[in-house]
Image (cartoon, helix red, strand yellow):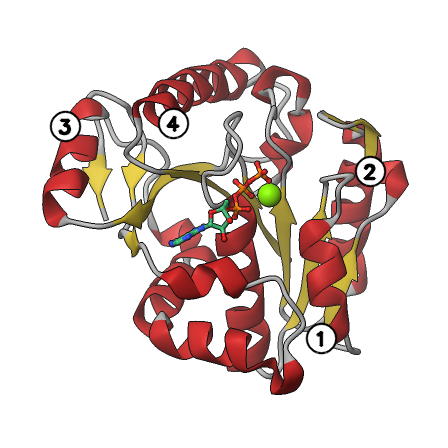
Amino acid sequence: MKTAVFANSKGGVGKSTIALLTSLSLATKYNRANVELIDLDPQATTSDSLSRFANYRFKVINNEEFYLGSTTPNNSRIISHLESSSDNHISECYSVIDCPAGNDPVRSTFLLHSDIIFIPTSVSDADVFATKKYIASLIDLFESDVENSPKKPPLAVILPSMIDHRDELNELRSILAGMPVYFGKPLRYSPNFRRAFRAERDDSNVKILLKEHAAYSQWITDLFIHSDRLKLRPKKLFQL
Ligand SMILES: Nc1ncnc2c1ncn2[C@@H]1O[C@H](COP(=O)(O)OP(=O)(O)OP(=O)(O)O)[C@@H](O)[C@H]1O
Ligand SMILES: [Mg+2]
């Protein structure tokens, strides 16, 4: 059982979009894997949209017991779910958790039970400032309870999202240069993402996205599956 979390305190940075792409890519490419998408957003956009694809291998969960308020996760309930899934499965099992905006690492101890935390951000100032703060509190969380942690802390990977131009990416990389986390491949801006969550006839919108971003999907699913191959914390921003 491996768990990836998509989180940032900032809204509209691409958390749900990339969680959708990652969970569907895992479920379609690895036909022996069990995949679950846990939507922690009471607005339930991701889970409402993806529930039409749910089957015996792809579970879509929006359980009110997993949150206490719109931005407050029910840590013990989520942790016990992740632990029981680990015990029950003999086959590969991947859990993808989509967090709502406003996620505060200090109140989200379930993050310590994940393997990898993906932090999407665009290049806009508001997103970058929020992302820097978010990462600083994430690192505080990792360092707060090292002795009692159930497992080694998760990897933290910034995901540049909605990227239009290479210059934007370079700018983002230089602003975040001092942060001791990984810097992922860019997800470019594509108008097709605007239609990612609707239920179109034949699901052509989703098929187009999976095809258009096949290389990105391959990269992010490989990274998730093999996250244990990377060392925990780079000294400064490390480009993957
Ligand atoms: N690469 C992209 N290209 C174009 N549009 C994108 C891209 N990624 C996301 N979007 C659009 O940006 C908006 C915000 O994306 P999304 O809902 O994934 O963000 P979020 O971080 O989950 O937001 P929230 O915090 O509200 O849950 C959506 O309208 C989505 O369609
Ligand atoms: Mg979202």
Name the residue at 49% across, 58% down: 194
Q: CA distance from mark 1 to mark 2?
A: 22 Å
Gap between marks 2 and 3, in whole Å?
A: 37 Å
Secondary element at tag 3 = helix
| Front position in the image: 131 or 142 | 131
Residue underneath mark 3: 174
Q: Position of residue 91 (x, y in %)?
A: 68, 73
Q: Is residue 193 left or right of residue 65?
A: left
Secondary element type, mark 4: helix
Q: Is residue 176 left or right of residue 126?
A: left
Nearest to the eye among marks 3 and 4: give it. Answer: 4
Q: Is residue 159 above or below residue 21?
A: above
Provide residue 1's location: percent of width, then percent of height: 64, 58
The residue at the point 76 percent across, 28 percent down is: 70
* Residue type beneath disc 3: Ser
Residue 216 visible from this viewpoint: yes
Looking at the rendered structure, which numbered label has been put on residue 53? 1
Label 1 sits on what residue type? Phe
Q: How many angstroms separate mark 1 from mark 4 (CA)?
A: 31 Å
In this rendering, would 46 be left or right of 162? right
Residue 115 appears in the rendering: no
* Relative height, residue 33 to residue 226 (above, below): below
Say which of marks 1 and 2 sits in front: 1
